[in-house]
Image (cartoon, helix red, strand yellow):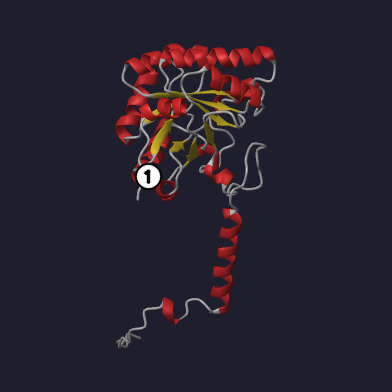
Amino acid sequence: MAKKKMTILDFKKYKEEGRKFAYVTAYDYTTASIVNDSECEIILVGDSLAMVMLGYNTTVGVTLDDMIHHIRPVVKGAPNTFIVGDMPFGSYNVSPEQAIASANRILMETNCDCVKLEGGVDMAPTIERMVKAGIPVMGHIGLTPQTSTSLGGFKVQGGTPESAKKLIEDALAIEKAGAFSIVVECVPNAVGKALKEALKIPVLGIGAGPDVDCQVLVTQDLLAMYGDFKPKFVKHFAKIREEMVKGLNQFHAETLSGEFPSPEYCFNKEVEIPKLY
């Protein structure tokens, strides 16, 4: 039996009920269809595709057209899963009007369920305008990869009383602006817990400890597909890269030995071939 797709209203309902949920990534139809067959409730088509799928060093190079190109097949592949479309760098930081136009394109051209954008207090007025325009918005604070350079690189955020206070202020501003949920990335456990307690909307944590409402991981990370780099907060729940290399090497070996293709993998019908040479 197919799982029931989560709705915007379910986010607040799950938090009120104390019900945890899981949030992973996908960037293509096949991966989306696999997640759709799992119990995971949410897929993010993240700007992390810049590194995971396109080989860039940061997320900054990915464009709005890139995002739409990848979100569309994910929506097709996961009809029973809530799909989040990430807004890339440069698509919303010029003005609220630009943000609304970019979000409209994502929603209209992909049919995903909401958009996600980075930023705190400074972004709250833009989020408010977007929500008033009928756009469902998921926030993102803490380590914000699009602006990681200005944060000193990929480092834990909220590690001092002052920075923790700033994160809570950011989260409350985003909630007041109308965001229905908020991703919090790379913060101490105590900060993740404080944010969960401070907000009425769910806190979706990636490297934010055990007390948040939802756990988030990049699929390629949790399945050990993405090379040797492993962030501290990532657990490998399977070792898919290892199995894929093993399978490819077995195919290579059987090709060289002639073991593959054996008769059961061949079309063995006798055909009279006319002599053409």
Q: Position of residue 177 (x, y in %)?
A: 42, 13
- Badge 1 is on which residue? 3
Where is residue 82, by image quadrant?
A: top left
Measuring 36% from the left and 39% from the top, which residue is drawn there?
5
Task: From the viewer's side, name the closer residue of 263 and 40.
Answer: 40
Q: Position of residue 217 (x, y in %)?
A: 55, 38
Task: From the viewer's side, name the closer residue of 123 and 12.
Answer: 12
Task: From the viewer's side, name the closer residue of 28 and 120.
Answer: 120
Measuring 62% from the left and 20% from the top, which residue is drawn there?
150
Question: Total label count?
Answer: 1
Measuring 40% from the left and 78% from the top, which residue is drawn there?
266
Where is residue 102, by image quadrant?
A: top left
Q: Position of residue 238 (x, y in %)?
A: 58, 52
Q: Residue furthest front?
A: 17
* Residue 17 seen from this side: yes
Label 1 sits on what residue type?
Answer: Lys
Q: Is residue 191 above or below residue 235?
A: above
Where is residue 207, by image quadrant?
A: top right
